[in-house]
Image (cartoon, rainbow, N blue to C red):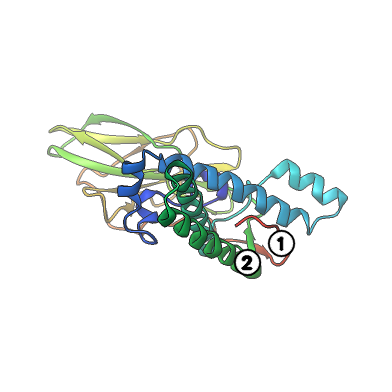
Amino acid sequence: MLLTDGSPNDTDSLRVYESSVLDTSSMESIDLGVKLHLALNEISEDVIDILLSHSTDWTGLLRRTKGVSDVVVTPQLKRWHALHTLEAFYRDAFNNQLNDRYQVKAQEYAELARGARLLTVRYGIGLVNNPIPQADQPQVTFTNGPPPAATYYFQVTWVSSTGQEGAPSKLTAVDGNQGQLPVIQALNPPPIAAGFNVYASLSPEGLALQNSTPVAVGGSFTLNATGPVSGNAPGMGQVPDLYVTGGSNLNRG
């Protein structure tokens, strides 16, 4: 996924690092979603600064225009975002309660976030030449068909003319009655999109590619009359075309 697609982590992802974070969030009335968004904004500013440190006057102007729209969320950047979120969360919790335990947590995650930032810079900021944004959730309607009643799960992705694929949309679940065949349409195509792919399943897991070639922008895809077919699973979006390594060493974690 791209850094502009949204938060690299969700609240469940944070539990990998801090199992009690959801309980603490509820107890202290701190919105983790707000902290995830705050950390994303702060990291995005830091990433722009790192990229600008590699720019000339001319390319710096282009970078300011692009922002972080071409930055890929690498595993290193994803970890940095999670740790920085937890740093901000426990700093807020300490400021609310002046609880020494929260202060220790905030300091611990600040140090871990600094290390994650340095690792991200050392490994490199991943960039793509032609960024494809994450698709919105698709529109699902129904036409007459033979399927029995079922719950269907869908994701869609945008595909460029060169076959590059963006990050899949959030999962969409729809209930179909007896004799209803799902028809899927991707919404709000970005300029780079030449078509879209449809992934489907009868469970939240196991989504598989349903179309043999990308569906044209503005078109729709009707699910197979026998139900979802087997195929490739959705990916995580584009992989970097190049990496920018080294650069600014700001104090932010």
Q: Amino acid at mark 2?
A: Leu
Q: Is disc 2 in contact with disc 1, using a CB cutoff of under 8 Å?
A: yes
Query: Which residue does the image show at 39% across and 55% down from the upper left?
Result: 14
Q: Is residue 143 above or below residue 225?
A: above
Percent coordinates x, y for residue 179 in the rendering: 15, 33
Percent coordinates x, y for residue 141 in the rendering: 30, 29
Q: Amino acid at mark 1?
A: Asn
Percent coordinates x, y for residue 104 in the rendering: 46, 59
Quadrant for the C terminus in the image: bottom right
Query: Which residue does the image show at 52% across and 59% down from the upper left?
Result: 107
Q: Is residue 181 above or below residue 47?
A: above
Q: Which residue is mark 2?
A: 118
Instruction: Tell which of 20 and 16 is nearer to you.
Output: 20
Answer left or right for 158 relative to 67.
left
Q: Which mark is residue 249?
A: 1
Answer left or right for 4 relative to 168.
right
Q: Which mark is residue 236?
A: none
Helix, strand or loop at mark 2: helix
